[in-house]
């Protein structure tokens, strides 16, 4: 493995690399700044792993959480877990800075895993928005339409499409390495198509669905106000539950967009215009995007009381002292 790369003197040095003579030489160091950065990123990785393991164990173990929506959340947590287990360690060892100037196999592996998991996350969120649409907008059809089988197909398609998108990016990169400028247009089209399929198109669908859900929820609220007291109490409880679930999952999507939009905008601009962006900015956008995998468990714990109860029981080790799988979570 090559340990150093000479780069242009106008670039900003990554804290884990150093300057030699007239050039910036990117080489592993043990500077205090580098050590603190790696410790910080390692802690984030541990938090991501622990947080998403809590979600996975909760949904798998507690019968009360065996619902179609939670199966989608479970699969999303698996994607986030792999970010902590695979992407973070690889990104610490083979940084964006390093992989910009090196084309090692592990750089390609890290990039492919990163693309697969980020695409899986956005496609899962798209599936969750469809689930919420039926729950709020077509409640009478929800139980017969969004079944465990349908959710299983959604999950399988999300992962398969994610792998195909990652393969597409990898093939485009390999083709460009072989033929260079001769097939630049083909590679450009492939990369733009990959971005549209993995991010912009699913996000557009989600935004449209959540706008529709918001309008229907407002209409339902007005209908409840005009109903008699008996009907209002019953329907209000159902409507409140569904609106809370929709609000929570909308926040999950919003956090995802805040974390990932800057990186995808940079990626699109980079593909179309080949703009030179400082290394520090690229590294920051990359880590901001990856940090999204840490936030979802905290959102669930904050908004869902049953996840709070499940987390407490797991952390306190109650699962080792008896069978609590059918325990009511409040």
Image: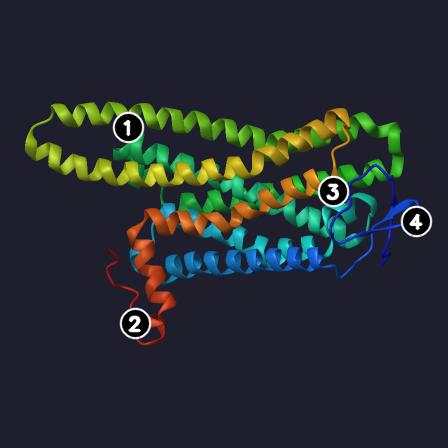
Q: Nearer the viewer, mark 1 or mark 3?
A: 1
Residue sitting nearer the eye, 238 or 302: 302
Circle 1/circle 2 CB separation < 8 Å: no
- Of residues 18 and 57, which is closer to you in this image? 18
Q: Which mark is residue 65?
A: none
Task: Give the residue number, with chain letter if any, for mark 3.
Answer: 170
Classed neighbour count for the residue bearing mark 3: other residues with Cα under 10 Å, few (<14), some (14–19), many (≥20): some
Q: Nearer the viewer, residue 130 or 3?
A: 3
Q: Which residue is mark 4?
A: 21
Which residue is disc 2 drawn over? Answer: 323
Q: How far, Cα to Cα, is label 3 from label 2?
A: 46 Å
- Residue 310 spot, x, y in % from top left: 33, 60
Q: Is residue 315 left or right of residue 33?
A: left
The reply to whether residue 163 is visible in this rendering is no
Residue farthest along the right direction in this orientation: 22
The local secondary structure at tag 1 comes to helix
Give the label on residue 217, or none. Answer: 1
Which tag, 1 or 4, sits closer to the chain's start? 4
């Amino acid at each position: 493995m090559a340990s150093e790369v000479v780069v242009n003197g106008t670039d900003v040095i990554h804290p884990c690399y150093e300057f030699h003579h007239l050039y910036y030489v990117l080489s592993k160091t043990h500077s205090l700044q580098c050590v603190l950065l790696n410790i910080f990123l390692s802690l984030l990785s541990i938090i991501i792993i622990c947080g998403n393991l809590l979600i996975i164990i909760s949904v798998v173990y507690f019968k009360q959480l065996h619902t179609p929506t939670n199966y989608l959340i479970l699969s999303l947590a698996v994607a986030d877990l792999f970010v902590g287990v695979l992407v973070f360690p690889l990104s610490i060892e083979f940084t964006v800075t390093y992989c910009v100037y090196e084309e090692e196999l592990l750089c390609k592996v890290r990039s492919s895993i990163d693309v697969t998991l980020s695409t899986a996350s956005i496609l899962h969120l798209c599936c969750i928005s469809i689930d919420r649409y039926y729950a709020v907008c077509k409640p009478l059809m929800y139980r017969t339409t969004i079944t465990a089988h349908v959710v299983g197909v959604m999950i399988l398609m999300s992962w398969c499409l994610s792998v195909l998108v990652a393969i597409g990016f990898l093939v485009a990169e390999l083709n460009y390495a072989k033929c260079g400028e001769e097939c630049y247009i083909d590679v450009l089209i492939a990369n733009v198509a990959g971005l549209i399929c993995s991010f912009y198109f699913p996000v557009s669908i989600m935004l449209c669905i959540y706008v529709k859900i918001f309008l229907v929820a407002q209409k339902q609220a007005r209908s409840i106000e005009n109903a008699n007291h008996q009907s209002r109490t019953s329907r209000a409880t159902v409507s409140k539950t569904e609106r809370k679930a929709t609000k929570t999952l909308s926040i999950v999507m919003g956090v995802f967009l805040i974390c990932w939009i800057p990186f995808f905008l940079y990626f699109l601009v980079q593909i179309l215009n080949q703009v030179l962006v400082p290394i520090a900015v690229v590294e920051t956008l990359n880590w901001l995007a990856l940090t999204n995998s840490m936030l979802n468990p905290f959102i669930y714990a904050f908004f869902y009381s049953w996840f709070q109860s499940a987390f407490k029981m797991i952390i306190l080790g109650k699962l080792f002292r008896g069978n609590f799988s059918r325990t009511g979570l409040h």
